[in-house]
Amino acid sequence: MSEFIINEETVALRKDENKTIIYNVDNCLVINKNLKNILNTNCLYYGSDLNGRRRSAQRLLNMKYKVPIIISDINNYILISIGSLRDNNCLLIMLNKIIDYEEKDNYLKIICAFNQEFVVNISKYSFEKLLINAIKLNNLLKWRKNVNNV
């Protein structure tokens, strides 16, 4: 599979060297493209490029770093990035698939829809900051859509 379009079934994406692992509701795919390329392709598919989506999120949230990635504002596809896109262990989780999270000894377990779990090396506090920013961005985008539909 060369092209992958993020959709309602997508739970998370993980960078694996120059490949990307896609976690869907009922399967797991390995795409022979790097994560940044897949993100840019998806942003373009839904109407912008990755840099444009980043700048938009930065402006809406009034912040520069660790901004959530808006894949599709129409479908409310927002990814929380755990780690930098440059890191080999970067994980992006779809905001609307996060069910719960719990802190263990030196890691955080993120529980997603359909019993998918991801263990990450991030503090609960840092993850909650990422989560709050993504929720704030999602709410702002929904509010703007509702205001413009009145």
Image: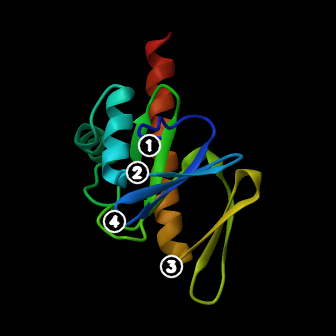
User: Real-space Cα distance between discs 1 and 4?
Assistant: 19 Å
Q: At label 3, which amino acid type do we have?
A: Asn
In the foreground, 130 or 140: 130
Q: Is disc 2 placed on a helix, strand or loop? A: loop
Asked if residue 103 is positioned above or below residue 53 in the image, the reply reads below
Q: Is disc 4 placed on a helix, strand or loop? A: loop
Q: Is disc 3 placed on a helix, strand or loop? A: loop
User: Real-space Cα distance between discs 1 and 2?
Assistant: 8 Å
Asked if residue 138 is positioned above or below residue 133 in the image, the reply reads above
In the foreground, 109 or 31: 31
Q: At label 4, which amino acid type do we have?
A: Ser
Residue topped by disc 3: 121
User: Real-space Cα distance between discs 3 and 4?
Assistant: 13 Å
Disc 1 and disc 4 in contact, CB within 8 angstroms: no
Q: Position of residue 149 (x, y in %)?
A: 49, 11
Which residue is located at x 50 percent, y 38 percent? 6
Disc 1 and disc 2 in contact, CB within 8 angstroms: yes
Residue topped by disc 2: 68
Which circle's residue, 3 or 2, is located before the other in the chain?
Answer: 2
Q: Position of residue 111 (x, y in %)?
A: 69, 62
Camera-side mark, 4 or 2: 4
Among the 4 quarters of the image, the one containing residue 104: bottom right
Q: Is disc 1 placed on a helix, strand or loop? A: helix
Q: At label 2, which amino acid type do we have?
A: Pro
Among the 4 quarters of the image, the one containing residue 106: bottom right
Which circle's residue, 1 or 2, is located before the other in the chain?
Answer: 2
Residue topped by disc 4: 84
User: Real-space Cα distance between discs 4 and 2?
Assistant: 12 Å
Camera-side mark, 3 or 2: 3
Camera-side mark, 1 or 2: 2
User: Real-space Cα distance between discs 3 and 2?
Assistant: 18 Å
